[in-house]
Amino acid sequence: MSILPEAQTKAILQKVIALSTADDTYVQIDGVTRGNVRFARNDVSTAGVVDNTDLQVQVAFGTKTGTATINQFDDASLERVVRRAEALARLAPENPEYMPPIDPETYVSTSTFSQATANIDAAYRAKVASDSIQPCKAANLVAAGYLEDAAGFTTFLNSKGAYGYQTSTSSDYTCTVRTEAGTGSGWVGHNVQDVTTFNAADDVAIAMRKAAASADARALEPGKYTVILEPAAAAGLVGFMLNFFDARSADEGRSFLSKAGGGNKIGEQVFGPEVTIFSDPTYDGAAALPWDNEGMARKRLPIVENGVVKSLMYSRYWAKKQGTTADAGPGNIIMVGGDKSTAEMIRTTERGILVSRTWYIRLVDPQTVLLTGLTRDGTFYIENGEIKYPVKNFRFNESPVIMLNNVEELGRSVRVQADEGGPIMVLPPMKLRDFTFTSLSDAV
């Protein structure tokens, strides 16, 4: 089991700090047990559990740093990993941007652990697979999907005494449902910290409806349309844009948040007034670790308020260089929405396109965050408040910056799947005008 007791891990961390002869030392232990089940063509294909615990040591002599990792914790192994990190540091070049470890900080309490998720076993995973496969078999549809659950801990200590220990859990489920002929496709994804809020049978029913409804799609002329992006469809675009909320790239003129003549756009109206984005490690249903990867304490951080940029991410080095303070990197991204469901937004749409999912998103122009990508797994034409028929998938060329200046309505925000290792995201469905589709795609 990879969740080691706090007292045991703290003793290991203290041993490593005591062994180090470097000027600065940072030690982190991460342990996780990951279980999974994969199914395809209405049958389970693989399943398993992986258990791993790693210790990472980073040391510095002046501004020369070295890092080494190990997964054994006896005294001889601990000394070996420290000496390896020190040897690498002595060989390394000087790093002019090196910042020493932080001083101890006080962390807020965040609820990142669910016993129900930690208790997931092979029988639970088999039931999720069965609840996904059996309804599809009965409806002559074909299911393929993946469930991964994780329970673990992270803890760190540095040579200045900053320390933290936290347990966490998560569960990721995705399922793609196709018609037997392969002409219709539906998809659903669910990311939760507490699996008591997840039901595979409910989720797969959504994918089944979209698969059946999207068969025999009609071609629609590319162009600018009012669209409703479901949260999963919006996530890839908004997440891509938020990667540019970096103060250094903006200050150096490499970002859409760079000001002509120098500086950045903090305090300027960049998006429509409907757009408010923030980070909060205590957010209910999307809680995050109370510290970032340097041990800096996370707090509620306004990012965009009513379309005005409120903050950018300053590394400690760049904050010092610019004479300002650094904020901890966000563990979650929350976009404020409204009260309506996607279905309710459809009912108020005269003409438009419903996009279930976007994929294969690539950057075209970093100065405008112009992105290109494709729709998939259910794209539908809306007329007079009703879904009329499925349409062939589109390639789009759109900037999320422009997109978030064309907001007509935002629905109820929900937790969505984020990129692996990225922050948790909570996003609303979005009704947007003048979304640009450039060509058709025959893929479903």
Image: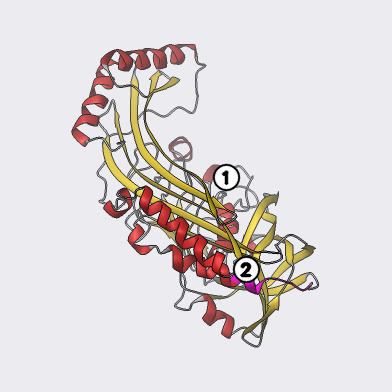
For the residue pair 103 and 413, the one nearer the viewer reads as: 413
Q: Is residue 50 visible?
A: yes
* Residue 217 highlighted magenta (yes or no): yes
The kind of residue on which mark 2 rests is Ala
Q: Secondary structure at mark 2?
A: helix
> Which residue corresponds to mark 1?
251
Residue 86 x, y percent position in the rendering: 40, 14
Q: Is residue 217 left or right of residue 228?
A: right
Q: Single out the mark in the foreground, 2 or 1.
A: 2
| Pointer 2 local density, CA inside 10 Å: few below 14, some 14–19, many at least 20 | many
> Which residue corresponds to mark 2?
211
Up/down of 53 relative to 120, above or below: above
Sooner in the amino-acid sequence: mark 2 or mark 1: 2
How far apart, in angstroms, are the residues tagged by discs 2 and 1? 46 Å
Q: Which residue is at 58% across, 85% downward?
A: 348
Coloring applied to the structure:
secondary structure
Up/down of 42 relative to 87, above or below: below
Residue 44 x, y percent position in the rendering: 51, 50
Task: Kindly give the residue lying farthest to the left in the view shown.
Answer: 7
Name the quarter where the C terminus is drawn: bottom right
Up/down of 321 relative to 129, above or below: above
Q: Which residue is at 27% across, 28% downward?
A: 160
What's drawn in magenta, residue-wise?
210-218
Q: Report which quarter residue 433 is drawn in.
A: bottom right
For the residue pair 180 and 77, the one nearer the viewer reads as: 180
